[in-house]
Image: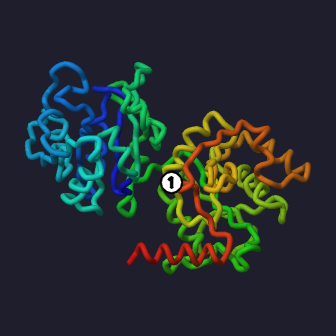
Amino acid sequence: MRNAPNMLLIGSTGRNIGKTELACTLIRRTRPTQPVAAAKITVIREAGGRCPRGGEGCGACTSVDGAYDLMKETNRDGVKDTSRLLLAGAFPVFWLRVHVAHMREGLDALYEQIDPHIPLICESNSIRHAVKPGLFLMVKDKRTRTCKPTARAVAHLADIAVGSDGERFDLELERISTRHDTWTLRRKATAVILAGGQSSRMGRDKSLLEINGQPLIQRVHEQLQGHFDEILLSSNDTRHAFLGLKTVADRQANQGPLMGIASALEAASHDRVFVVACDIPDIDINLAHRMLNDAEQYDAVVPRSSPRGGDGPRLEPLFAVYSRSALPLMNDSLAEGRRHVRSIFEKARTCYLDVDAVSAPPNLNTEAEYRAYVDRFDSTRR
């Protein structure tokens, strides 16, 4: 799967519900400060000349002879979707028609024609199977519950659903922006970096381990910026003052991470809090968005993976989303002397979000894990 942080992908549950208008609006908002490219991507599934929408169709799919066809839009009449994207200010604009078995090949051809450091806005559902964009929006028709199959297949991967009545959207579009060539969505939520551990297995302070010339905790902080209304630091001392974050001390020291989470929930400005340990060097922000989406109905949303070797499911309680509604359960558990975060899961409304082992958040607990990570990091930069 291609990793494309500069891509904002827009899908939709149906036709004519404002997907292109949303793309054009975001282009107009972005264009005054930086260039932006755009593409409409049509994934072809049917063979033998049959139109996927039924009937004779428009010929867009059946006219593709090879694995894909990439056309650069130059017409500014505003009739076609790609022409509307061009009029909105995007440049260049492409229409990629690609057979489903050749999506990666088609994406490679598209990226050969654009600067990977320029923000890119794409329209498609099915291409999500072949690319991990910086941000994936799913436009939903507020007037109906119907959902076309291509949207249903990828809806669970959307960072956020955007309701539309065909003219207006229920998302504050100023919350979408770009930062360091990556699309960001600033959520009405708090992020908390847990940095109160003793680093006993590491033998030295994990939070200050150096990766690419910066402390690990600073790397974590930078990956969270632009995605949350508020970022807090859970710590009991001042060694991380250089981050400039509001620090929340534990109500009672030496009670473990559950105390840190409970204390942060009390101090947070929002009911939903994304918690991440300071020893997780790579933040899957898309996974964080998906957990935040589910948190409206749960007290806790926790990733669950199945490691190789049949050791049973692995939970990630220190890369999870907690709602303020979980605070009474946390306080009860702490009062009873149960300090493990998992102690609340059976009583709480807990959603376990299944992820594959590769997508599970990695953490650095030992010197060997740290050295192995640095070696992999350095090898990818060569």
Question: In the rendered image, which quarter is residue 251 located in?
Answer: bottom right
Q: Which residue is mark 1?
A: 285
Identify the residue shown where x is 38% and y is 44%.
129
Identify the residue shown where x is 68% and y is 74%.
366
Question: In the rendered image, which quarter is residue 243 located in?
Answer: bottom right
Describe residue 206's horizontal placement relative to residue 155 as left or right.
right
Closer to us: 56 or 331 = 56
Closer to us: 363 or 321 = 363
Q: Secondary structure at mark 1?
A: helix
Q: Is residue 296 visible?
A: yes
Q: Position of residue 160 (x, y in %)?
A: 46, 40
Identify the residue shown where x is 69% and y is 50%.
312
Q: Position of residue 301 (x, y in %)?
A: 64, 43
In the picture as drawn, the residue positioned furthest to the right comes out as 336
Describe residue 128's horizontal placement relative to residue 320 as left or right.
left
Q: Position of residue 66 (x, y in %)?
A: 15, 45
Q: Is residue 59 above or below residue 284?
A: above
Other residues around mark 1 within 10 Å, as few (<14) / some (14–19) / many (≥20):
some
Describe residue 8's horizontal placement relative to residue 113 as left or right.
right
Question: In the rendered image, which quarter is residue 5 located in?
Answer: bottom left
